[in-house]
Image (cartoon, rainbow, N blue to C red):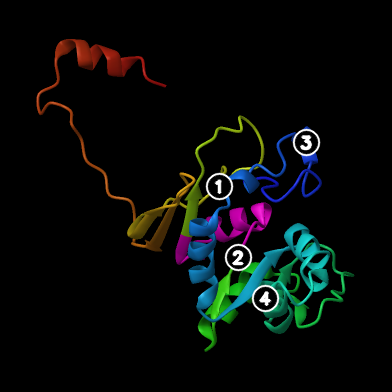
Amino acid sequence: MQAPGGPQEDPVGGFRYGGWLIPYFDESLGVKVGEIFARPFDLLLGRKTYDIFAAHWPYVGPEEPLGALFDQIEKYVATRNENFRPDWQNSQVLGSDAVAAVRKLKEQDGPDLLTQGSTDFLQTLHAHDLVDEMYIMIFPLVLGKGKRLFAEGAQPAAFDLLSTQASDSGVIVNHYARAGNIETGSFAAENPSPAELERRKHLS
């Protein structure tokens, strides 16, 4: 999920494929993205993604309605820098305990909290089971390296698939909702063979 929007977006770690999303962003995918933004929402962002947004969206001009929308809505920023003061309008820092701040926001009345990018912050949200819904876009390419959506420390969780749709360019957009704990089962024989019992002895 690293640097989908351009080569200079996030080249950290020597990532060479910034802008990989662009060839797949056709009209059909744009319609689906528009549906996601059609619900009332505030933005909940990690510091790096906030910086990317704040350096772009306020400057796109009136021909890009998403820029005007992002200007107007509330933006919450998770950062470890206690001295950070956001200068993009309608922006505020979550504070020293971002997890507690998010939990408090979720308890209040208001629009959805929508997170985009924010790779590091998403790991924290997953680790504390604070993700209620996910839109996951699966692109028909393999990058081989780069930042990932799910990393070590993510809270094990089950999700229901609410909808799925493929764009004309081959992007699969899945919408998931949190669905409780993981359930397990087994295809193993009720009476394992001696070979299977021996195999299990060597598992680590």
The residue under label 1 is 153
Residue type beneath disc 1: Gly
**Earlier-in-chain disc, 4 versus 2:** 4
Q: Residue at x 77, y 36 (%)?
A: 13
For disc 3, the marked residue is 13
Residue ID for mark 4:
65
Query: Which of the two marks, 4 or 1, is nearer to us in this view?
Result: 4
Q: Which residues are magenta?
A: 115-134
Q: Amino acid at mark 3?
A: Gly
Residue 48 image offset from top left, x and y in percent: 77, 57
Residues at marks 3 and 1, CA–CA distance in whole angstroms: 21 Å
Q: CA distance from mark 4 to mark 1?
A: 37 Å
SS class of the residue under badge 2? loop
Q: Residue furthest left?
A: 191
Rendering coords of residue 85 (x, y %): 87, 74
Could you tell me how far apart the alpha carbons at marks 4 and 2 are, in whole angstroms?
Answer: 19 Å
- In three-dimensional space, the C-alpha distance between marks 1 and 2, rounded to whole angstroms, equals 19 Å
Say few, some or many: other residues with alpha carbon within 10 Å of mark 2 (under 14 / 14 to 19 / 20 or more).
many
| Residue 123 lies in the magenta stretch | yes
Q: Secondary structure at mark 3?
A: helix
Examine the rendered structure and indicate whether residue 35 appears above or below residue 156: below
Q: Secondary structure at mark 1?
A: loop
